[in-house]
Image: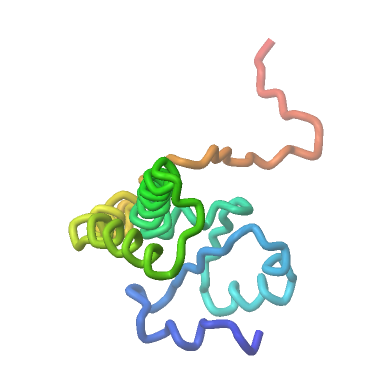
Amino acid sequence: MKKCPARYTVQLAMHPRYRMIVLNGYKNYLLIQFKEFCKKKNIITFYLPTYSSYLIQPLDVGCFNVLKRSYSRQLKTFIKIYINHIIKTEFFIVFKTVHLAIITANNIQGDFRGVGLIPYNPQAILSKFDIKLQTPIPIGPPLLDIDL
């Protein structure tokens, strides 16, 4: 628990009584000590399914994904003209062209809107998950309240 960021977030919390931490599906977070620590410090834990944390990383979802595809398309044009080995100079020429076209202020702002971070819209992320609320299963026999 020594490396838990809770002590760094106290001043940043919007509501002084509760904070939320978003975690990936990594199982070490499920330790009893961690759960007790979060409960004691009023930290709400939100577990994302394994390998889904990229959904809330705006630049991964938007700009970098588009950058990767655009770079690949540019490389295909090199291959079409029989350039199969690309040196650093050619790499930077292609990368710079693609980077300047894709990584713009408008695209970055759009990525933050797209994942629901600015303006804050949690439904933008939650709608991508198949979330099923769990209802506690009764242990005893059902109570029948029927007049016969």
Where is the N terminus found, in terms of image quarters?
bottom right
Q: In the figure, residue 98 lies in which quadrant?
A: bottom left
Q: Give coordinates of residue 138: x percent, y percent.
A: 74, 38
| Residue at (60, 51) in percent of width and height | 49
Q: Is residue 47 above or below residue 80?
A: below
Res. 44 visible in picture: yes
Q: Give coordinates of residue 10: x percent, y percent.
A: 42, 84
| Residue at (44, 72) in percent of width and height | 18
Res. 123 visible in picture: no
Q: Give coordinates of residue 134: x percent, y percent.
A: 63, 41
Where is the C terminus found, in terms of image quarters?
top right
Q: Which residue is farthest top?
A: 148
| Residue at (32, 64) in percent of width and height | 93
In this picture, residue 3 sits left or right of residue 13: right
The residue closer to the viewer here, 54 or 147, is: 54
Q: Is residue 129 above or below residue 87?
A: above
The residue closer to the viewer here, 12 or 88, is: 88
| Residue at (58, 58) in percent of width and height | 47
The residue closer to the viewer here, 128 or 31, is: 128
Q: Is residue 69 above or below residue 144?
A: below
In this picture, residue 53 sits left or right of residue 59: right
Q: Is residue 130 above or below residue 4?
A: above
Total numbered labels placed on residues in the image: 0
In this picture, residue 125 sits left or right of residue 37: left
